[in-house]
Amino acid sequence: MTEAVSRRDPPPAARRYLALWFPFLPTDRLRQSRAGRACVTPGEPPLVVVARVRGALRLVAGDARAVDLGLGHGLALTDARARVADLAVVEADEAADGDFLARLAAFCELFTPLVALDPPHGLMLDVTGCAHLFGGETGLWQEVRRRLGRLGLTVRAAVAATPEAARAFVRFHGDTVVPLDAAEAQAATLPIAALEAPAETALALARAGLKNLGDLAARPSAALSARFGSGLAVRLGRILGREDVRITPLRPPPDCLAERHFPEPLQQADAVEGVIGDLARDVASLLEERGAGGRRFEAALFRVDGVVRRLSIETGHPCRDVAILLRLFRLRLDTLADPLDPGFGFDAVRLSVPLIEPMAVLQHALDGGGREESDLGDLVDRLVARLGRERVQRFVARDTHHPVRAAASVPAGAAVASAPWPRPAPGEPPTRPLRLFEPPQPIETLAEVPDGPPLRFRWRRVLHEIARAEGPERIAPEWWRDGPDEPTRDYYRVEDGEGRRFWVFREGLYGEAAGRPRWFLHGLFA
């Protein structure tokens, strides 16, 4: 099944969110890292995760059997061992848990490109407009659980109209799909704990006889805000579906994308190129309709075991030529340090365009000038695909009078505008050398007058007698970058008796409190 999508935001009232919660994520991660699947082998003891809290080891997580045995969060390890002698204990690793959740988030992009973290141990997916690809919201909900369950993970899922409502249902109700027309009525049955308010607030609400969100919603919001602060009333309204604050996805949504899901996992790595070609044609059609071309393309390959491989290419100019895109992806595949391994197969392949720009039809000149420029752009694109984005650079001019900051190198495909390059007057020599020393080289000089050019200078033990000199060109420091104490520089273009030309400067002025000015050689003219 292939689906090409051009991103358009649907009406706010129609948005739907899928909340995923992994109640045993730390222990599932540990088992998966050991055996490749988060499954329990027969005879294996209950597994708990501990951390040091105020000098004592306490339980921070446990698997399903540990929870069934009453080994809950916060229990001291000594008390847990007194209850269950045969206990497997592992120290907590929050960084590893975070990395594992991020990998699950990448895998969940199989269902929607809008995925956000929902700590602790949860994910939030904006599935607006995606459910029809899986037979509706119920089919989507079941497919997500099936694919994650295939990895041996325990997961709960809930679909609702707001992120807060989906989170409340998945953590305090269970697996469900909340219809739009019954959102507030079903949310009213959730317990007060679904607000996840501070302990003192929850205790005060319980003492007031409020058992569920419906009891709380019947109270005036002004009274709730006066007693518990505005945050409680705001969260209550969001859980009831009265206000929707969209999630911030981990990866910005692409401008357009095309994807293909396979009824059976794709196990031939050679077939990937053909699938990318089909998707490139779908994306090219979308770009042509919009009169645009892509500057960056990314192919995401979703493997059965949850691993996601990403292949990115960039072009120097907006492009929608399928042949060019395939050639660049082929070069990218050939230069992978880690060859593409389908493992047990790919479930889906997606081609997205994160960056697009308006594209004008290229008119070639009769002398072939347009073709030469296009050939240069194609060469740069191939080099970037083969060597990597950061290894192919171009120079851009900066809008500054500071000689060191006047030019910079950026990735060839980066969308960075360049200031106009300075051009010398016809018949005049360049005012700046092509080669600059960083840092400038100190030199010993002798000047006829304190503020004049040097008569001679010594650099690298060689004495140079000055035959001609031009200057000074005074360059003041950029105080907003360098600070107020940076000294002024007087630059001179000098030529010695053998015709060698240098760019030297005097740092500081005579008579200043900083002391005697120093001389430096900053560059060499060709």
Image (cartoon, rainbow, N blue to C red):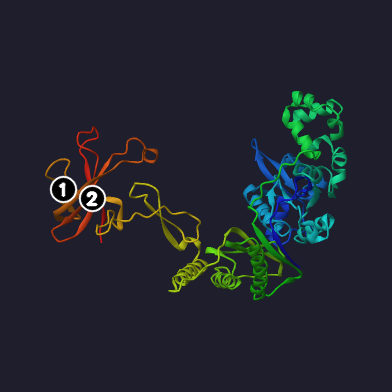
Q: Which of the 4 quarters of the picture holds residue 188?
A: top right
Q: Looking at this view, is 47 or 481 the one in front?
A: 481
Residue highlighted by disc 1: 454
Specify the quadrant that holds the C terminus: bottom left
Residue at image coords 32%, 39% = 486
**Taking 365 as reference, is 63 left or right?**
right
- Judging from the image, what secondary structure is the residue with disc 1 in? strand
Q: Position of residue 381 (x, y in %)?
A: 51, 67
Give how far across and how far down residue 375 sits, in percent.
Answer: 47, 71
The 10 Å Cα crowd at callout 2, few under 14, some 14 to 19, many 20 or more, is many
Vertical order, 295 against 114 (above or below): below
Residue at the far front in the pictured view: 366
Left or right, residue 454 beside residue 262? left
**Decide: marks 2, 1 in contact (CB < 8 A)?**
yes
Q: Is residue 459 left or right of residue 389?
A: left
- Locate residue 200: give its quadrant: top right
Residue drawn at point x = 48 percent, y = 60 percent: 390
Disc 2 target residue: 504
Horizontally, residue 375 falls left or right of residue 192, namely left
Instruction: Tell me the CA gap for discs 2 and 1.
Output: 9 Å
Q: How many marks?
A: 2
Q: Nearer the viewer, residue 151 or 11?
A: 11
Disc 2 residue type (three-letter):
Val
List x then y, in percent, for residue 479.
Answer: 36, 38
Can residue 461 be seen at all in this image of the molecule? Answer: no
Instruction: Give the amino acid at mark 1.
Output: Pro
Task: Give SS at disc 2.
Answer: strand
